[in-house]
Image (cartoon, grey):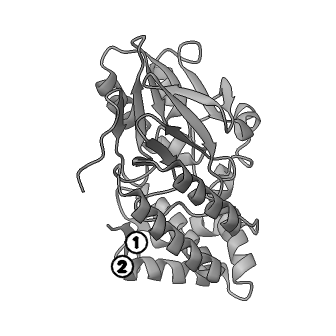
Amino acid sequence: MPPPILPPTVAVLERGWLSANSVVGFEPDGSATVVDTGYVQHAAQTVALVGELLRARPLRRIVNTHLHSDHCGGNAALQAAHGGPAACAIEVPAGELDAVNAWDEDALSFRATAQRAAGFRAARGIAAGDAVMIGGLRWQAHAAPGHDPHALMFFEPGSGVLISGDALWQDGFGVIFPELRGEPAFGAQRDTLERIAALRPRCVIPGHGEPFGDVDAALQRARQRLDAFVADPLRHARHGVRVLLKFHLLQHADAVPRDALRQWFAAAPLLAEVGRRYWPRQTLEALFDETLDALCRAGAAHDDGRCVANRG
């Protein structure tokens, strides 16, 4: 299948799995908008990549699909590099506007997942049904709960392009975090997939991975994955724990001492909560060993007994 065609006023900075993709819109007035800004560890890289793409254009707006650390971690640095809050406004899902402006790391999930993000303030909350101008085009904001209850996705009817965040990837979707905490959300994820199907996008710009055009096939794979998780919630819980450990390894260019990695695992509140909920008779140490072993067997990590290195 040929690569999908994006509107000429929209560009995608495809990132790795530690940092979400950034979507850049070139506005008719000569300014620009950026959707999602990657992880805080890559903030300097984000500033450089966006600056190279914009050249002399001013960045006037930053928009977030949702507020997980890999999507909003570069907000503060990018805003500071482009004149600060007075010159560059940040817009976030309306359901998290208050938490952002109070910088409540518990409500924003950073503390629970033991992840980082630099604090910032938002000028506006975007709600489902709002219109968002990106690249001189009018995008519809749609609710995309499942992976995150407040998540949004943005659809441009003329081009048929959907900015999906982590609601749909070419081969799945993001971990359904509310389920890890005992809050039903498989149904919300299914509703989001059906909402995408009803929009009939011709191209999806996912939060991770390259833009793709075979949307029906991606939706079918996502539905099959969701069905497997619904049939076996423990499978989803194992997947979620592995993703959190893998994400932590992605932050380290060098190998991490095994004891330090174990200590991080034990100190992450969400991992302890998941362990108590799904494996109440298993120690957290045993869950760590099992999770790390699974990553190593999958080729996603290497453990020499003293240090653990990211792989793949």
User: Closest to the observer: 218 or 119?
Assistant: 218
Q: Residue at x 52, y 44 (%)?
A: 71
Residue at the spot 71% in from the left edge and 36% down from the top edge: 94
Residue 82, relative to residue 92: is it above or below?
Answer: above
Residue 183 x, y percent position in the rendering: 76, 65
The picture places residue 83, in percent across and down from the top left corner, at 49, 14
- Quadrant placement of the N terminus: bottom left
Q: Give the label on residue 219, or none.
A: none
Q: Are marks 2 and 1 in contact (CB under 8 Å)?
A: yes
Q: Name, please, the residue furthest toward the left.
A: 2
Q: Is residue 22 left or right of residue 267?
A: left
Q: Which mark is residue 304?
A: 2
Name the amino acid type tagged 1: Cys
Residue under pointer 1: 307
Q: How many marks?
A: 2
What residue is shown at x 53% (from left), y 60% (from top)?
174
Can residue 73 be seen from the camera position used here? Answer: no
SS for dot 1:
strand
Q: Secondary structure at mark 2?
A: loop
Query: Position of 160 compared to 237: left or right?
Result: left
Spatial separation of the CA atoms under disc 2 and disc 1: 6 Å
Which residue is at the far bottom?
281
Q: In which quadrant of the rendered view does residue 298 lie?
A: bottom left
Q: Residue at x 74, y 47 (%)?
A: 107
Q: Is residue 29 above or below residue 94?
A: above
Residue 269: percent from the left, percent from the top?
70, 63
Asked if residue 306 lies left or right of residue 125, the reply is left
Image height of 31 relative to 251, above or below: above
Mark 2 packing: few (<14 Cα in 10 Å), some, or many (20+)? few
Q: Locate residue 217, reporting x and y percent.
A: 40, 65
